[in-house]
């Protein structure tokens, strides 16, 4: 059950900070939690995408001051001892409890942040709406530019024109892709595909319901296929399409969650193409400053993705709009 409640301002410990949340983004993970399709520890305040201001600091906090404008990595309460933490991969630590599902998150006016070392300052020219989209941008930086091994002049096909797909498309162009192709369905024609057509870094926008997408991508790539496919749909048919359009020895970087325990998977198609498939989860520590720079310099423009702005009382309206593809990104102002 999800509901709006009055809660006290969180108390902070000596090594913690209190963040006044200025803007909070709705993530697909929040929708998965709403439908019990993602692990969480209730009762818990949802939300992990935020931009805010430090309102108070514990007595042992030395590097942060009241009034600092910040965003924060959600890799809180990782153990620091396991092989993942010790190799710089605390985002995958099994003990991690992130804001929004493991500990109270940012869908509130104030948020206790237990690990100030995971905070990042944002530049003065970045507004809080943009700041709230740093976390999903860090995801695509990690999944496309780092793990997806994007190379200059790559032809990139993005399957799924949701917020992550559109951010991934912009990240691909910022990484010097030669052509960026976004693929959706007729259900996306109400808002998502028209939005994609307005984004300058996206070269081609296709609907699988209106044209032969495989043939089109082959024509755009001299018959080879896409060098890199970004799977951002989380849909069984979308995943299968990615294996159709990737070139031999190409790469597929998977971002979208299916929300299901099993799907039909075109295993042999990938084998016969000797394609590389990267599974991804969360953000790398190195992706955050890159994401802040890409947004603050305008190389990624997140503002066209925001379709809904409002208060926490509107959560049901916003969740429904995003699930029905009548919205792209929702922002709360707690």
Image (cartoon, rainbow, N blue to C red):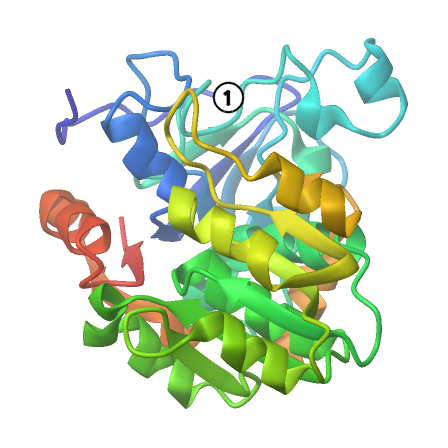
Work out whether residue 226 or residue 133 is closer to the camera in this orientation and state it: 226
Identify the residue at horizontal 41%, vertical 23% (top origin): 101
Q: Is residue 7 left or right of residue 275?
A: left
Count of marks, rendered view: 1
- Could you say where residue 88 lies in the image, as x and y percent from the top left? 85, 30
Identify the residue at horizontal 40%, vertical 31% (top origin): 105
Q: Residues within 10 Å of mark 1 (few under 14, many from 20)?
A: some
- Could you say where residue 24 lies in the image, as x and y percent from the top left? 37, 50
Work out whether residue 197 or residue 45 is closer to the camera in this orientation and state it: 197
- Could you say where residue 262 lies in the image, as x and y percent from the top left? 43, 23
Q: Is residue 314 left or right of residue 285?
A: left
Identify the residue at horizontal 74%, vertical 25% (top origin): 90
Tell me: residue 320, above or below residue 36.
Answer: below
Work out whether residue 4 or residue 245 is closer to the camera in this orientation and state it: 245
| Residue 90 showing in the rendered view | yes
Work out whether residue 279 or residue 321 is closer to the camera in this orientation and state it: 279
Which quarter of the rendering shows the N terminus?
top left
Looking at the image, the residue that sits furthest to the right is: 87
């Amino acid at each position: 059950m999800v509901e709006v409640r009055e809660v006290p301002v969180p108390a902070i410990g000596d090594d913690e900070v209190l963040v006044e949340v200025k803007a909070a983004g709705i993530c697909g993970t929040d929708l998965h939690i709403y439908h019990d399709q993602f692990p969480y520890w209730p009762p818990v305040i949802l939300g992990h995408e935020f931009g805010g201001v430090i309102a108070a600091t514990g007595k042992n906090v030395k590097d942060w001051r009241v009034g600092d404008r910040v965003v924060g990595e959600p890799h809180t309460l990782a153990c620091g001892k396991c092989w993942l933490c010790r190799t710089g991969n605390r985002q995958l630590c099994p003990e991690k409890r992130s804001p929004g599902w493991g500990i109270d998150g940012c869908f509130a006016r104030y948020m206790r942040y237990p690990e100030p070392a995971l905070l990042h300052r944002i530049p003065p020219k970045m507004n809080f709406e943009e700041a709230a989209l740093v976390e999903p941008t860090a995801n695509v930086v990690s999944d496309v530019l780092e793990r997806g091994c994007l190379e200059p002049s790559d032809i990139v096909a993005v399957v799924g024109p949701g917020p992550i797909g559109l951010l991934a498309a912009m990240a691909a162009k910022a990484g010097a892709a030669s052509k960026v192709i976004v693929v959706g369905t007729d259900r996306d024609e109400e808002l998502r595909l028209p939005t994609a057509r307005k984004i300058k870094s996206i070269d081609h926008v296709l609907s699988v319901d209106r044209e032969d997408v495989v043939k089109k991508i082959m024509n755009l790539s001299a018959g080879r296929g896409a060098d890199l496919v970004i799977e951002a749909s989380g849909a069984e048919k979308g995943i299968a399409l990615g294996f159709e359009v990737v070139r031999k020895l190409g790469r597929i970087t998977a971002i979208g969650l299916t929300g299901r325990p099993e799907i039909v998977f075109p295993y042999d198609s990938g084998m016969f193409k000797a394609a590389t498939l990267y599974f991804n989860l969360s953000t790398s520590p190195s992706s955050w400053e890159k994401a802040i720079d890409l947004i603050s310099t305008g190389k990624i423009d997140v503002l066209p993705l925001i379709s809904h702005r409002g208060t926490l009382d509107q959560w049901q309206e916003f969740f429904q709009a995003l699930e029905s593809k009548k919205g792209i990104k929702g922002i709360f102002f707690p």
